Image (cartoon, rainbow, N blue to C red):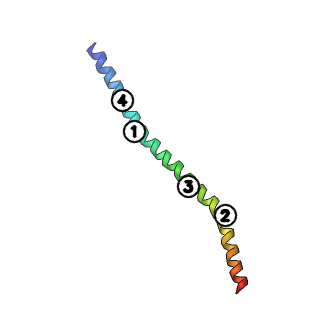
């Protein structure tokens, strides 16, 4: 009975270690997803912003 308890304890400890390590990997994946979403937002925002800035400089050039 004692060897069964030791085996079960070792098994549970092993599973706990695997889940602990996998959480760090999950955190890195979450950071990667956040960086990708931020990049998409920046790329989408640059299009209209670039058009507005070009129009502003054309108006300034025309005024000069």
**Labels 4 and 1 touching (C-beta < 8 A):** no
The secondary structure type at the circle numbered 4 is: helix
Instruction: Give residue 47's mark.
Output: 2
Which sits earlier in the primary sequence, circle 4 or circle 1? 4
The secondary structure type at the circle numbered 1 is: helix
Name the side, left or right, on which 1 lies relative to 22: left
For marks 4 and 3, give the CA distance: 37 Å
For marks 3 and 1, give the CA distance: 26 Å
Which sits earlier in the primary sequence, circle 2 or circle 3? 3
The secondary structure type at the circle numbered 2 is: helix
Image location (x, y in percent) of residue 17: 36, 34
Instruction: Bin the neighbour count of mark 2 within 10 Å (Cα to Cα): few under 14, some 14-19, many 20 and up.
Output: few
Which sits earlier in the primary sequence, circle 2 or circle 1? 1
User: Which residue is rendered at x = 52% and y = 50% of the image?
Assistant: 34
For marks 2 and 3, give the CA distance: 15 Å
Q: Which residue is mark 3?
A: 38
Q: Nearer the viewer, mark 2 or mark 1?
A: 2
Instruction: Give residue 21's mark.
Output: 1
Up/down of 49 relative to 2, above or below: below
Up/down of 21 relative to 31, above or below: above
User: Which residue is rendered at x = 63% and y = 61% of the image?
Assistant: 45
Q: Nearer the viewer, mark 2 or mark 4?
A: 2
Q: Quadrant of residue 41?
A: bottom right
């Amino acid at each position: 009975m004692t060897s069964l308890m030791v085996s079960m304890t070792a098994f549970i400890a092993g599973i706990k270690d695997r889940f602990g390590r996998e959480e760090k990997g999950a955190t890195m994946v979450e950071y990667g997803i956040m960086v990708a979403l931020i990049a998409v937002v920046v790329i989408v925002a640059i299009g209209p912003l670039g058009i507005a800035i070009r129009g502003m400089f054309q108006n300034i050039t025309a005024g000069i």
